[in-house]
Amino acid sequence: MGSTACLNPSCPARFHRSEHARRRCSPASAADGPTAAGRYTNVPGSLTAGSGWEDTRTVVAGLRAEYAAITRLEADKAHPSWKRRLQILGEIGEHIHNETADRTGERPVRDVEADRDAESERDRAIAAVEGAAKPDVNNEGDGRWAKFLGAQQRLDEANKEVNRVIRAWQRAEARWADKYVESLVGVLSEVRPMGGTLTVHEKGNRQAAEAVQAATRMYPSSWVELSNAATAGRPLVSQIQKKGGVYRKSAGARFSKGGEPVPVSVISTSRKRGNPEHELAHRMEHVVEGLGQAEQAYHRVRTTDTVGVQFPSSSHQGDETIRVFPDAGFSDPYASRDYEGDGSSWEVVSVGVGNLCGDNESRMLGLHGRRDDPSHRSFVFGALATI
């Protein structure tokens, strides 16, 4: 099945499956997004399958089957190969992204005219301030004060207008990203069941439990079931905190069951957007066989050069040694973290899903002029659809 290159540089999809979709996303039509200076309409989109989705879904099913077959063949090897499996995850992820982008509709494009008008007025206001005679600061009756303060007020208003135009575009992009996430969940659910009821201990924090439960929509139902099965021997306790979060597979013994303390796992999260999804990904790393291994293999590819030499890293020493690889090229460097001595905890999926849901302004989509990372996004989507 062929695909057509997109001509719109603002489109997150590099290819479309039909000439109609490519024309719909052309720069000319995309430029019609803003309806007035700094104001944007809601982006149209059906959230329903595109005309080529059934064919694509067949391709995805074949790739998923190939991934499973290779995984079985490599299972008993001391050093299993990941090259083809990572390629498969990337291909599946790109298919998922393209379908999601098609369903979401056109991405808002900056209102160039509004930007130009606001910046031109700011330039004129700056010139007016610079050209105004400076009054005597020790003489309140100096007649030059009125002109100087008027010019300064004009500059303040011009700066506010520039910021207002930028914020209007950013809000429009954020609404588009929210719709993209909704579309993504729909596309993934047509590949495999998504979401479910997460089992957490009744004595955990209710707000945290609700936040983590809502986050399950981003993860396969089979992953949720594996998490629930793991609570039989080690209950999962939810905790709330003001910012950030942490998941601990082994968090000591708590509560009493028949007079004996019970070992637990803890998922602690804030209510910040994307944080529950981030921490839930770490829970999934420890209960879903093959997820952490896939992250490790992908991390190795991103942090080494073409001949296998690892990039330089910076280290943070605390309770554990953490290495960060600035040259790995992740749009969010946090995704490059390597917790030395662990080998089972990574930030590839957690940062990907968390950022997509709002934990980072770029949203894994290169929003607000930030750098995009299609490779990372494709891996994450492929993992969600396949593992």
Image (cartoon, rainbow, N blue to C red):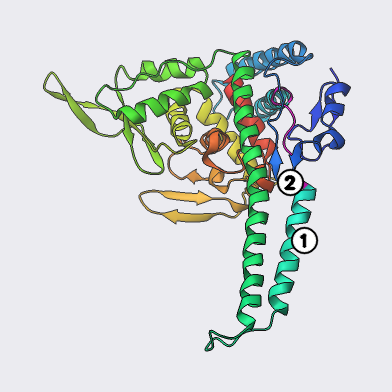
Q: In the rendered image of this protein, does residue 98 appear above or below residue 358? A: above
Residue 7: in sight, yes or no? no
Mark 2, residues whose alpha carbon is within 10 Å: few (<14), some, or many (≥20)?
some
Mark 1, residues whose alpha carbon is within 10 Å: few (<14), some, or many (≥20)?
some
> Taking 223 as reference, is 336 left or right?
right
Q: Which residue is mark 1?
A: 120
Residue 153: in sight, yes or no? yes
Callout 1 amino acid:
Ser
Q: Quadrant of the C terminus?
A: top right
The overriding secondary structure of the stretch rendered in magenta is: loop
| Secondary structure at numbered mark 1 | helix
Callout 2 amino acid:
Ala
Q: Residue at x 68, y 83 (%)?
A: 133
Q: Which residue is mark 2?
A: 37
Percent x, y for residue 9? 80, 40
Residue bounds of the magenta highlight: 102-111
Q: Which quarter of the picture shows residue 196?
A: top left
Q: Residue at x 45, y 18 (%)?
A: 224
Percent x, y for residue 43? 70, 30
Q: In the rendered image of this protein, does residue 306 appear above or below residue 288? A: below
Residue 340: within the magenta? no
> Taking 191 as reference, is 5 left or right?
right
Percent x, y for residue 127? 74, 73
The one of 236 and 146 positioned closer to us in this rendering: 146
Residue 103: within the magenta? yes
The one of 221 and 61 positioned closer to us in this rendering: 221
The one of 350 and 72 positioned closer to us in this rendering: 350
Percent x, y for residue 213? 41, 23
Distance CA(mark 2)–CA(mark 1): 13 Å
